[in-house]
Image: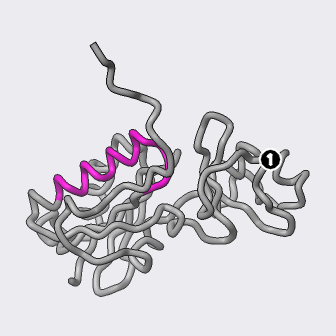
Amino acid sequence: MQTILAFDTATSVAACALFHGGAVVGECEAEAKSILVAADSLIRAAGFQPSDIEGVVVGVGPGSFTSIRIGLAVARGLALGLDVPVAGASTFAAFAGGRAVIDARRGEVFTEDGVSTPADLVVDGETLVGDGAIRYRDIFEAAGATVPPDDDPSHRPSAALLLGAAGHFGPADQVEPAYLREPDAKPSVP
């Protein structure tokens, strides 16, 4: 595959990147609900057409349940519309510069170890990045971690990092989300 679109919508910032010949030819950020518009703009700005896309890499989480679903739905729609394979990649792979800590809401964070409260996370001597690191900066710094300034780019996911962490390319419906906990919404029972 020569031209691959990669994106992640699981965190508070959605990231999108376009690869051609293994090199990044463009990157952008957007809101999760606008990822398709951002991807189209990115593709066209790089001089390509959507029909040039030969594969899609999507971040599978963890993160916001709704945002993960948006990303997977967009990946599946692109796969069907363009007849291309899809590969999933952990949202943690989209972060560089430290241990990724994603805000899980409800007073919790996601890390590669799972879901925990910020106070229960052992972080002494580590550099933490991500929206969870920013939100719980005081707790983490009191526990001996370093959290870069809020505006440091390491807190923002980079879809350019997803390709290297992508799993096997195949049918879009085989890419599974990584929620790490049950969704808040439950079906009502009559």
Q: Position of residue 35 (x, y in %)?
A: 33, 49
Task: Indicate yes or no whether the magenta region holds residue 64.
Answer: yes
**Type of amino acid under label 1:** Ala
Q: Is residue 180 left or right of residue 44?
A: right
Quarter holding the N terminus? bottom left
Task: Indicate yes or no whether the magenta region holds residue 50.
Answer: no
Q: Is residue 13 left or right of residue 142?
A: left
Q: Which residue is mark 1?
A: 119
Q: Position of residue 129 (x, y in %)?
A: 68, 60
Query: Is 126 in front, or is 14?
Result: 126
Residue at 50% over, 51% down: 180
- Within 10 Å of disc 1 (Cα), the crowding (few <14, some 14-19, many 20+) is some
Instruction: Judge whether residue 13 can be spotted in this image.
Output: no
Residue at 48% over, 61% down: 91
Q: Position of residue 6 (x, y in %)?
A: 34, 66
Q: Look at the numbered disc 1 and give the secondary structure of its residue.
A: helix
* Quadrant of the image occupied by residue 101: bottom right
Specify start and end residues of the magenta stretch as a single range.
61-78
